[in-house]
Amino acid sequence: MAMCVEDRISSFPDYILCHILSFLPIKEAVRTSIISTKWRCLFSSISTIEFDHCLLSGLTDRNVDSFKNFVDRLLKFSDQVSLDCFRLSDGISSWNDEDHDFDVSGWICAALCRGVKEIDLQLDNLGDAPPVLFICHSLVKLTLEGKGSKLEVPPDACLGNLKTLWLENWVLFGDSINRLISNCHVLEDLAFTDCCIANTSELTIQSPSLKELVLDFFSEGLGDFNHVLVINAPNLVYFRYYSKIVDGYTLSNMNSLENADVHIDAFDFEDDETTATRLFSDDEINATRLIQGICNVRSLTLVIDGVIPPTVPFPIFHNLIEFSFYGREIWLVEFLYCAPNLKTLKFSFSDVPGTRWKTLLTEVPSCLLFQLKEIEMLISCSDKHMIRYFLDNAMVLEKLIIRVRDLTATQREKARNKLLQLLKNSKKCQIVIL
């Protein structure tokens, strides 16, 4: 005899059922329409609409037009339930041609008309971002991936409630972006990833509400670095900056900064010797000024590619307790003298340690004597003098992690035995060789 099972889920109010359906892939949510009459149209009232790569990869010549019509009905002719999120992946671009002509702009506008809070769009081969995207007061989070397209921001741009703005792989025009940022009055999280800056003398990021900032300008394509970067963000907590050195830096009111990740690169000059010397000198000054602007940071990762010796004296990094470094030894030497409260140090050199390191022998940095508790270094076998220096002078060191380059297992074991025989002043110090 068949057991009768009570359908308790269907007894829930519609708004609860729609909330449950919002966690399902759109394809699965639509399938629930066959459960009963009550479920037939519930999927059209879900608050999260996502067309991901898995769904779009299943499109064929037979069903692509049906899919387009379905999305049109779902977004444009629903009962106008407000949307929490609308996501569209780049899988649709392969079908957006003269034969099918998806109305992506219309879909975006329909989502905006329904008061959408989050939009995530991959606009590869789908045209420009609709201007209406930048005058929507309901948006809280906006993510746009452009595949090297130019991002045009209208003069009347205003995103009054936007807290998160992530732009990836766009060509950005400084005046346009400056206008956009200045009209995002509650912005907390801003990220430019794999972007280029074009046709501007100054990129200004001024926001009293901003807490996280990512500027990744290591992008191949259009754009230049002939601009000045101006940042005024008194509440900024996290800063990531990957770029070639630009024409100047003005970083102010960054007293709240806790964590910074900076990766800068010098240009390869192919000009005449006089011009190259002048530009090289500018790189030195600008790189040092960038570092000066983040002197309140507590945790810093610094990667410096190319030959960029510091020329302007560093300020004292009173708050710095964690420092990770990759670059030329001269920068690390300078930092050790300017970080009196440093407790954790990780480093490797892009060059072979030379005479500059020996300057530490004349005056031991105070952080080595009184603060450093953990050091991790990536070195070669010939750098034992450096290890001995740390062991002799790091008086409160608790752990020394040594990673040795290019060693076989046998060579590593021999190196380990030799290194463990080195005397150490800190009685608590544990030596780990990897």
Image (spheres, grey):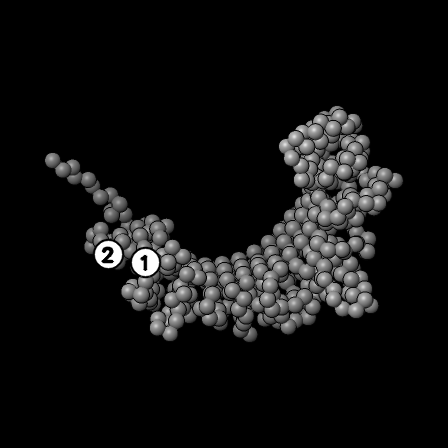
Gap between marks 1 and 2, in whole Å?
A: 11 Å
Question: Where residue 266 sits: x, y (%)?
Answer: 72, 59
Q: Amino acid at mark 2?
A: Arg
Left or right of 363 in this view: 183: left
Residue at the location (76% across, 68% down)? 271
Residue pointed to by mark 1: 45
Is mark 1 in CB contact (under 8 Å) with mark 2?
no
Left or right of 149 in this view: 392: right
Left or right of 425 in this view: 200: left
Closer to the chain start, of discs 1 and 2, is: 2
Residue at the location (70% across, 63% down)? 246
Seen as rendered, the residue at the extreme right is 362
Q: Quadrant of residue 118?
A: bottom left
Disc 2 secondary structure class: loop
Residue 106 visible here:
no
Pick the quarter of the image with the N terminus: top left
Q: Amino acid at mark 1?
A: Ser
Residue pointed to by mark 2: 40
| Viewer-nearest residue: 133 or 140 | 133
Left or right of 185 in this view: 289: right
Pick the quarter of the image with the C terminus: top right
